[in-house]
Amino acid sequence: MKNSIAERIADFLIVHPPFSNLSHDELIEVASEIRVLNLEKNKTLFQINDLLHESFYVVASGVINLSIISDAEETLLNKCVAGDILGLRPFFAKNNYMMTAKAREESVIYAIPIDVFRPFVAKNTNVLDFLLQSFASTSTNPVERSSGKLLNDSVRHIDNQSEIQYFQSLDYNKNPLTSTPNAIVQNVAQIMTDNLIGCVIIQENNLPIGIVTDTDLRAKIATGRFYITTLVSNIMSSPVITVPENLSLAEAQLFMLRHNVTHLCVTIDGSDKTEIKGVISQQDIISAQANNPGILIKEIKRAQNQDELKRLREKLADFIRTSFDKKIPLSHINTIAGEVNMAIIKRSIDLAILEMGSPPARFAWLSIGSQGRKEQLLLTDQDSILVFEDVASDKYRDVKEYFLKLSKKVTATLETVGYAYCPFGHMASNQLWCKSLTDWKNQYSNWMNTPGEKSDEICSIFFDYELAFGEIQLEEALTEHIFRNAEKNKKFFAFLGTDSLKKPAPLSFFKQFILEEEGEYKDRFDIKTRALMPLVDAARVLVISQNIKGINNTFLRFKQLAITEPKYSEVYMNAAEAFITLSKFRTHEGLKDGTTGQYINLEEISKSDKEKLKNALLPMKDLEEIIKNKFQLTYFT
C-alpha cells in the first residue's frame, strides 16, 4: 500500500535540487523517513549555539528567518522560503549552530534525517556536486557555508557580518616539491626549509603515494618517535587526498574539512592514478579569502568616511567584472553584490548616526527598486524609503526632522560613493518618503484601495523593498498591512496588472527589434524598458496576488511562482531563465562601456547572440495572457 504522505512529499521535493537528482523510488525512501514540523509564527527551529540536530530541513511552506544577535540586536541575514534548504551544518561540521532559524509566519518544515540522506550523497555525484557548490569554509579551521539562496546556518561571521564566499577557481602551487619514498627525512626537511614550503608530495613515477607536512615532522620526528635518518615512507601520510584541476575555493575547503587534512594533491583527473599537477595548502585558501567579498564586507563595516566607502564600492565593481568574465552564475553574483550594496548602505547610515547622535525613535531604512530586489550589479540611481515608529503627536515634527536630516546625509554619502540620486526623488531624504509606520500604512492603503485616482503618485517599485538597516518589526508590519490590503482587491490588481503591460513592445510585428529613433541612444535597443521591466513588473504583481512574501528578486519570484502555480510552471520557468539571459546582456553592455547597460548596440553582438536575445523575449507574450486572464483587466483598459 502506498504511503500517500510520502508520495506528496516526494512530489514536492522532486522540483528542488539536490532532490531533483534522485529517482522517484529514492525520493520515496527519503520521504518515508521525513518528519513534518508545523512551526507557529516566531517559533524557533534552532538557535545560535544549539547542539546540532540529527536532521536537516526543507521549507515546505511559509518563511523562515535566519539571523544572528549583534550587540543585543537581532540582525536578519536571509529568508528561506518554500524549497529552500537550511540546517545543513550536521553534514560536515561538529560545532554548534551559528545562527537562529525562526518562523516569520506559520510554516511547514520537512525534517530529513542526516543518516537517511547521507548514502545518496555518497553514491550520487550530482547530489555531492550540489553540496560541494553550496558550501565553503571561511576560516583557517574550516567551517562550511552555502551559496546563493542557501545562505543559511552554515555561514561564518566576521564581526557578526555574514561572509559571502566567492566560488572562483583556486590558485595554488603548480610546482610542488616531490620526493621518492626512499629519501631520508633529514634531506627532505632541508629541502622544505630552503624552499619555505610546508609539504612534500611523495611520488613514484610521478604518481602520488603520500605526503609529508610540517605537522608530520613535528609529530613524528621532533617527538623522537622516528629518527631523522629514517625514510620518508615511514612518516608520510598515505594515501594522499587527491583532487582535480580547476577546483573552486569552496570545493577545496570542503575536501579539507571532510578528510581532516591541511593539504590536497592536485592531479589531472583527481585520482592518485594520474600525474601530479600541484598542491593546495591552507595558506592558499587563506590568501584567496583575503580577496573575497566577505573581507570586503568586513572592510565596509570599518570604513570611517565616504571616500573609503567609494574605494570599496570600486572593489565590488572589479569583483563583478571578474565574476562575469569567469562565467560565475549571474544569480550568485547578484546575491553577493546585493549583500555588499546593503553593507555600504548600512555603513553610510552608521556614519550619519555617529555624526548626528542616537535616533529619537526606532526606524527602518528600506531599499526599494533594483536595490530592494538585489538586482543592482551596475551603478544606477538610489531608491529608498524610511519608516519610523509611531510617536506622540507633539513629538512627530521633531522626530521626522531628525530622520530627514539623517536621510540627507546618507543619500549624499551614497551619491559620493557612486549611487546617483534618484531623478524622481524616490529617496528617504524626500519628506514624502520619510514618515511614520501609520502614515506609511495609510499611504499604501491609498495606493491600493483607490488606484488610478492619483496615478502620478503610485509607483510600483514601492512594492519591492528590502530591509537595509533598522528594525525588522517595522518592515514586517508594513508587509502584513500590504498583503491584508491585497486580499480580494480586484481593483488594485487590475491597476497593477495593467501597469505591467504598458511597457513599449521590444519587437515589431515582423519580429524585428524596435530601436530608439532619436536622441543620444538612437538606433540602440532599450533592454531595460522593453525587456527587463516587463518581467520585473509581471513577477511583482503575480507574487503579491499569490500571497508570496519575503521574495523580492525577480528570478527567484518566477521560480517560486512555478512551484505555487504548477499549471503555469513552464511559463514561469521560461521567464526566470529569460530574466537571467537579459540581465547578462545588460551587464555585459554596462561593463563594456562603463554605463548602466540600458541601451544595447545590436551591431556589436553576434548573430547567434541576437537570436538568443530575441528568444529571451518570447515568454513575455505568455505572461501577458496569464495577467490578462488572472486579473480580468477591465478597470483601466
Image (cartoon, rainbow, N blue to C red):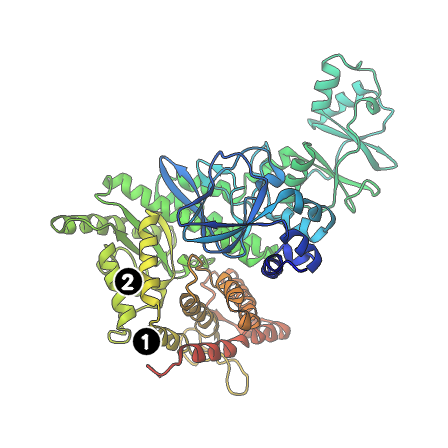
Frontmost residue, 125 versus 531: 125
Coordinates of residue 116 in the picture (x, y in percent): 66, 45
Q: Where residue 606 is drawn, which disc sits there?
A: none
Frontmost residue, 197 versus 331: 331
Residue under the point 70% across and 24% down: 214
Quarter placement of the N terminus: bottom right
Q: Is mark 2 on a helix, strand or loop?
A: loop
Q: Do labels 1 and 2 touch, CB within 8 Å?
A: no
User: The disc labelled 2 sits on which kind of residue?
Assistant: Gly
Frontmost residue, 211 versus 494: 494
Q: Mark 1 points at which residue?
A: 491
Spot the residue most to the front. Answer: 1
Coordinates of residue 501 in the picture (x, y in percent): 41, 77
Earlier in the chain: of badge 1 and badge 2, it is: 2
Spot the residue most to the top. Answer: 224
User: The disc labelled 1 sits on which kind of residue?
Assistant: Lys
